[in-house]
């Protein structure tokens, strides 16, 4: 079989030339020997501006202002940065979002807060294909609080549907926990419809936005989302271990109480009070000292997305994933590679998953060749396309190497 590698490279060059966001690629640090970085859905590339921001922080607020910087700026950072994430990416008004902890810890706090607020309801609805940490956290909370789990099983290569949620919720349901963009298939769940269905049953909904934030437009306030979490090291380029964000709708602030009561989330941090009194508003979600250093890199990406606008980011994302699907159909389908993501771009996030039994082995060889996607068992090669840092040329080059590796006679 001949692979028209040159033909796809030429198409990619045309698409890059016509891409209004192409100049923004220069804002990111390039990596020696990397032919195609296709894993921005796991760890976004660093921005050049982040280099200066990090060194500036050592000499500036930390080295210069020392402990005084807590009063001057750091105490406010979790909510100030949370408000920026909310405005730029979440479609949420200020005062409802904090940056703190990991996604896992914030999930725990919000799941516990949500179920404890509704003691008469004894069930959490969750799906079997949700990300492991989400399933593990609800299993832990259910064991801790004597609750039941009601499991939805999505169709293969798909996400949870409104009908499945309708069938699962009842007056026993305290909380529905789902991912907005499924980490395997990349399918976007119908957030407005599902949220409404859960509300009709009197339940709260917690959305995991890890694969959405910074790649898919969101309107949390408009759709009356109750709670949400998301990480910042994927499409917000916050760097490895960057803290996550939590959204808690203002209407629930006086109704919920999170379980990790720490001094930094107390009403008067330096009162050294005898008893815990939660801070007002979303600040109550904070527990210990906020990870100020970890909050730095995402600020550069948020500034970039703010400049470009989420709708332009989403347009580029759709164009990139559509191109990946087109190439996969032409170059990879002949080797029985199956598309395990939606064909319909309106329900496809910013990654495309390809299925084939040989792809685990192929992924290891791709990394050696400087083509960097990731792999999720059992057979899924994930092509993550971070809209502002990925070129069409990278998509063509990367998938051409996949085709070349699959074309070799099998052992
Ligand atoms: C959908 C989803 N949820 C949760 C997590 C876990 O996040 P953290 O490691 O920040 O706890 C991830 C990590 O990749 C994820 O993809």
Image (cartoon, rainbow, N blue to C red):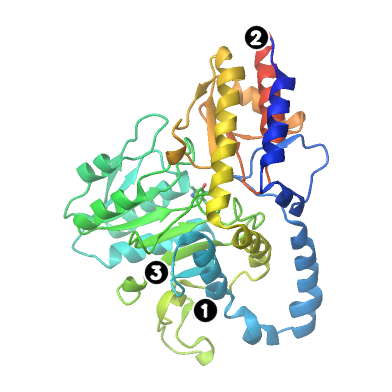
Task: Classify mark 1: helix, strand or loop.
Answer: helix
The answer to the question of whether label 1 and label 2 lie on touching residues, with beta carbons closer than 8 A, is no
Residue 302: horizontal and vertical position, in percent? 61, 62
- Left-right relation of 316 to 6: left
Task: Classify mark 2: helix, strand or loop.
Answer: loop
The quadrant in which residue 402 appears is top right
- Give the crowd class for mark 2: few <14, some 14-19, many >=20 residues within 10 Å: few
| Mark 1 vs mark 2: in front | 2
The answer to the question of whether label 1 and label 3 lie on touching residues, with beta carbons closer than 8 A, is no
The quadrant in which residue 360 appears is top right
- Left-right relation of 24 to 302: right
Q: Earlier in the sequence, mark 1 or mark 2?
A: 1
- Give the crowd class for mark 1: few <14, some 14-19, many >=20 residues within 10 Å: many
The residue depicted at 36 percent of the width and 50 percent of the height is 191
| Mark 3 vs mark 2: in front | 2
Q: CA distance from mark 1 to mark 3?
A: 13 Å
In the current view of this chain or complex, which residue is farthest to the left? 171
- Left-right relation of 232 to 161: right
Q: Earlier in the sequence, mark 1 or mark 3?
A: 3
Say which quadrant the C terminus sits in.
top right
Q: CA distance from mark 3 to mark 2?
A: 54 Å
Q: Which disc number belongs to residue 294?
A: none
The residue depicted at 41 percent of the width and 86 percent of the height is 275
The residue identified by callout 3 is 259
Placement of 144 over or under 342, stated as above or below: below
Residue 47: horizontal and vertical position, in percent? 73, 56
Placement of 257 over or under 349, stated as above or below: below
The residue depicted at 40 percent of the width and 60 percent of the height is 220
The residue identified by callout 2 is 410
Q: Exactly how many numbered labels are in the figure?
A: 3
The residue identified by callout 1 is 264
């Amino acid at each position: 079989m001949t692979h028209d590698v040159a033909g796809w490279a030429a198409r990619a060059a045309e698409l890059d030339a016509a891409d209004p966001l192409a100049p923004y690629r220069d804002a990111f640090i390039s990596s020696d020997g990397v032919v195609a970085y296709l894993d921005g859905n796991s760890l976004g590339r660093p921005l050049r501006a982040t280099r200066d921001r990090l060194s500036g922080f050592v000499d500036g607020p930390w080295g210069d202002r020392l402990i005084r910087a807590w009063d001057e700026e750091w105490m406010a950072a979790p909510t100030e940065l949370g408000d920026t994430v909310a405005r730029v990416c979440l479609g949420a008004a200020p005062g409802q979002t904090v940056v703190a902890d990991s996604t896992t810890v914030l999930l725990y706090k919000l799941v516990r807060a949500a179920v404890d607020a509704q003691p008469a309801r004894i069930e959490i609805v969750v799906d079997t294909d949700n990300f492991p940490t989400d399933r593990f956290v609800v299993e832990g909370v259910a064991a801790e609080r004597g609750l039941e789990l009601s499991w939805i099983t999505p169709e293969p290569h798909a996400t949870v549907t409104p009908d499945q949620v309708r069938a699962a919720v009842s007056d026993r349901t305290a909380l529905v926990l789902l991912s907005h963009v499924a980490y395997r298939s990349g399918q976007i769940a119908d957030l407005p419809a599902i949220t409404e269905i859960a509300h009709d049953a009197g339940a709260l909904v917690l959305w995991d936005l890890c694969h959405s934030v910074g790649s898919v437009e969101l309107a949390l306030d408009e759709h009356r989302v109750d709670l949400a979490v998301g990480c910042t090291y994927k499409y917000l380029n916050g760097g490895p271990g960057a803290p996550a964000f939590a959204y808690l709708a203002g209407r629930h602030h006086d109704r919920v109480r999170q379980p990790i009561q720490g001094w930094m989330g107390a009403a008067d941090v330096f009162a050294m009070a005898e008893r815990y009194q939660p801070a007002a508003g979303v600040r109550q979600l904070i527990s210990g000292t906020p990870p100020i250093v970890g909050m730095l890199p995402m600020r550069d990406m948020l500034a970039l997305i703010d400049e470009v606008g989420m709708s332009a980011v989403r347009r580029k994302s759709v164009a990139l994933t559509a191109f990946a699907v087109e190439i996969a159909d032409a170059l990879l389908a002949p080797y029985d590679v199956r598309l395990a993501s939606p064909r319909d771009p309106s329900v496809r996030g910013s990654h495309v998953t390809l299925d084939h039994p040989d792809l685990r082995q192929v992924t290891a060889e791709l990394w050696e060749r400087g083509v960097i996607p990731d792999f999720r068992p059992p057979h899924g090669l994930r092509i993550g396309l971070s809209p502002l840092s990925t070129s069409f040329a990278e998509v063509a080059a990367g998938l051409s190497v996949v085709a070349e590796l699959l074309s070799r006679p099998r052992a």
